[in-house]
Amino acid sequence: MMFPLCVYAAVILCSFTSISNGNVEQTVLRGVQTSLLSMYIPSKPFTCLDGSLTVPFEFVNDDYCDCQDGSDEPGTSACSNGQFFCENKGYLGTLIPSHFVGDGICDCCDGSDEYETTIVCNNTCFELTQKFQAGRDARRTLHEAGVAKKKEIIAKSKAITSERQEHFNELEQDLNNLENDLKETEKLKQEAEVLEYAAKEKNQKLWEEKRAIQQAMVRDQQIREIFVDLDTNEDSLVSIDELQKHTELDTNQANEFTVEEVRSILGSDSVNFNEFNTIVFEKISNSYQSSPEPTTPTPEPTPLPEPSIYSATTPSSILETHGYEEEEVTTTSSFYKDNEEENNNERDDYHESSSVSTSLEHEKHIHASLAPEYDNETKVLIQIADQARNEYNQLKEKIIQIKRQIQDFKKQSDVDLGPNSDYAPILDECFDYDEREYTYRICMFKTAKQISKGGSSEVTIGYWDSWSGPKDDKYLKMKYSNGATCWNGPPRSLTVTLQCGTEQKLSDVREPSRCEYTMTFETPLACDETIANRPLHPGHVEF
């Protein structure tokens, strides 16, 4: 069924309509977008828009599909892949699938898709225009208020940015000064440490020399004790039969401690003190055990031999060997003399098992002893070196901190903060969104986390990656990636959609796919000045 001519102006009349105006004739086709009218010229054959075929123009809108792309039937439902253009005059022109044409349902707000049916379509274009206008006015009002706050935020941000730049310049100057100071402090430290080291070395050497003297004296005492303990007949000699009693010295415990084995230790049938010192002592000192305390009364002791017998390792010779005067170790010498007097007066004490063990314990104590305190001069040098080290380390720590601040500033400077750095005010700022189980926290251009309200866990769902909006507005979305890996899944990631708002807040958080999160962030910084400057109630709307 054909409607009367000119029911709708321009593009939605008959298969084609001639409008005469003097000698001018213009043909307009139903269902063709205005931008494509130049491809449909009635006086010329029609070439399919995909270029696959050329047909006589009469084939256009003849209700038979000739073109593979359906472009020859823009006004009919003949082609399943064709598109019909609803002009929707006064509202937004739209494209609908051509098989919707004449299906008894009003798809175009002006009803032009049902031109051949008996269906009466109410023209709803005006109502849609009103709703569209109201929505656009509300959007414009929101952006107007948002832009006003955006300007305030950016003005404050610029002041902060200027302060940060000044601070950065100060940091670089401080770093330069501190590095110069560090070189001078390091030089002073090294000089103080040279003096400290020399003083410590001197003290260490003196202590080691004195300790060596003490050890030699203790060793001498130990040799005397063992010699006296072995010299049971008190003839100032240790003989084979005296040593043979100490079977613990037998290296081959399976057999008898033979005379030959004893002679191999002594080197002869008997040895005096000097020979015992030089030949025997080292062979038996580790295995020797003192004689048990006698069960019968001991005879009166005879006087010990003259000191000349033991002259090989007297304290005087030890002191001379190490370059010390005897009075330098008065205490040790006194100890030695007291013990010698005790040897002369109480001979039977050497037969007690405690005598040798006491000397052995004394020797262990000397080996295990710590160095004595440093003298006052050395202590002063140590204090000076410690102070120099502290000053050096403090300067070094300050330099590390300043370098870290400078590095952070440079990293922030490399971040793309949007056109004209509009998003600089929220750099490093954090925002939370609470739901029943978790708090979601995003720190702008850094990290995003999921925090359990039970306090049991904190999961990173992404690190700042890049802007990820569409090509025409990449600053519409933010991408955070490489978060904590899901169990048997991919690393977590987050997409943040920015929307104009009068406040800065997260308004929605979801997980549409496993380990892939989305957030909506409202901020005045996303408000568009172009939208804010549109007329609020225009006389007409250009679509």
Image (tube, helix red, strand yellow):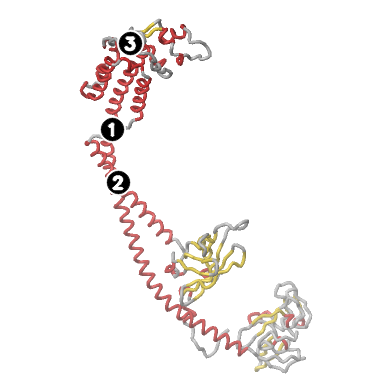
Q: Nearer the viewer, mark 1 or mark 2?
A: 1
At numbered mark 1, what does the secondary structure look like: helix, strand or loop?
loop
Give the residue pinned by disc 1.
Answer: 372
Pointer 3 residue: 299
Residue shown at 52%/85% (left/top)?
Answer: 137
Residue 44: which disc? none
- Which is more foreground, mark 3 or mark 1? 3
Query: Which residue is drawn at the image coordinates 57% and 85% (left, top)?
Result: 132
> As shown in the figure, which amino acid type bears the numbered disc 3?
Pro
Quarter of the image that includes the C terminus: bottom right
Q: Does 349 appear above or below 130?
A: above
Q: Using the rendered view, name the quadrant where residue 201 is placed.
A: top left
Q: Of label 2 and label 3, which has the lower sequence position?
A: 3
Give me the C-alpha separation between circle 2 and circle 3: 70 Å
Q: Label 2: which residue?
A: 390
SS for callout 3: loop
Dividing the picture into quadrants, the one containing residue 264 is top left
Q: Residue furthest top?
A: 269
Whether residue 277 is visible, yes or no, is no
Residue 197 in view here:
yes
Which residue occupies the foreground of this view, 482 or 313?
A: 313
Between discs 1 and 2, the one toward the N terminus: 1
